[in-house]
Image: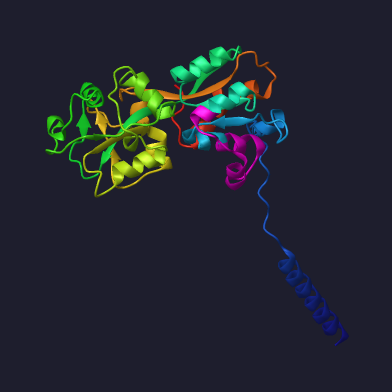
Amino acid sequence: MKKWTALLMAALLLAALAACDKKTETPAETPASTEVPAETTTPAPAADALFTADTMPRIDGSTATIPLSEGLVQALLGYTPEQAADYVHHNKTHAAYENLIAGTADIIFVTPPSAEEEQMMADSGTEFEVTRVTLDAFVFLVNSQNPVQSVPLEQLRDVYRGKITNWSALGGDDLPIVAYQRQDNSGSQTLMYKLVVPQTEIMAAPDELKPATMEGLVDVVSDYDAGAGAIGYSVYYYASGMYVDKGSRLLAVDGVTPTADTIRDGTYPLVDGYYAVLRKDAAADSPARKLLTYLLSSEGQQVAQNMGYVPLP
């Protein structure tokens, strides 16, 4: 009996040990790979090497380049979009040139200088450097009620020379053309003189046909009651993204609609861009020069593209 009891106790002990082993068993781990992964480098934020909030250059510029400045501030200082919007203050094109010349701005992002602004820079006794940093285009807007979709460039020139005065001559309704312009030294007016009709040839326009702001021009062209015969102009970035009104639309020129692709490949006929302007004697390690160098780099151009601009080729 003792023998059977001993055998029974041994059997129970073995069963308990087996059960215990089963509970604590874990799946075999997959052996770690011995392959060394290809080395990857995550670029450090440019701000680490270039700028802090205290060393960032003083930036000014046109209305249409506000998002460009905000994108640079986000990339270089690590600011949120809201912080960048609070940080960036542009005083519009002409005032930006004045501030650069006066020394209260270090670099400005603007449309090309007008004849008056070029003279201001020359009279200042300081040489300035003007460098294109993104592409953009000069565009025409018409009221959404207007059936005309495309106008040859030469006919647009004749509209603003005062030679064509009715939409019927452009394939539209028998309706007088109300041709809006912008104030002299505004960015879009400078582009009008540069790309379409020289200042010496453009027809005179009363003040009521010269809105003081870019949004004001979009508004008058879009007006349902008064804008059916209206035409005006702006820059592509602003009119297609920054301030859009469903009451107006962009006009194709020579059969080509302005888009990022037609601007990039040059098929749209009125391509220009935005420019960085700074003092020519700015040292290589000056904040303004370092910012320009960054913007022209592949990383800086990607920042511009991320903000909706057409990068340089």
Residue 120 visible to an observer of this rendering = yes
Q: Which one is nearer the viewer's eye here, 220 or 280?
A: 220
Q: Residue at x 25, y 31 (%)?
A: 252
Q: Residue at x 52, y 36 (%)?
A: 66
Q: Residue at x 54, y 33 (%)?
A: 303
The range drawn in magenta is: 70-95
- Whole-percent x, y for residue 9 in the image: 83, 80
Q: Which one is nearer the viewer's eye here, 228 or 295?
A: 228
In the picture provided, is 291 more to the left or to the right than 185? right
Specify the farthest residue to the bottom: 1
- In the rendered image, which quarter contains the C terminus? top left
- Whole-percent x, y for residue 137 in the image: 37, 27
- Whole-percent x, y for residue 120 in the image: 53, 17
User: Residue 173 occupies which quadrant of the picture?
Assistant: top left
Looking at the picture, does residue 62 appear above or below residue 265?
below
Q: Which one is nearer the viewer's eye here, 13 or 141?
A: 141
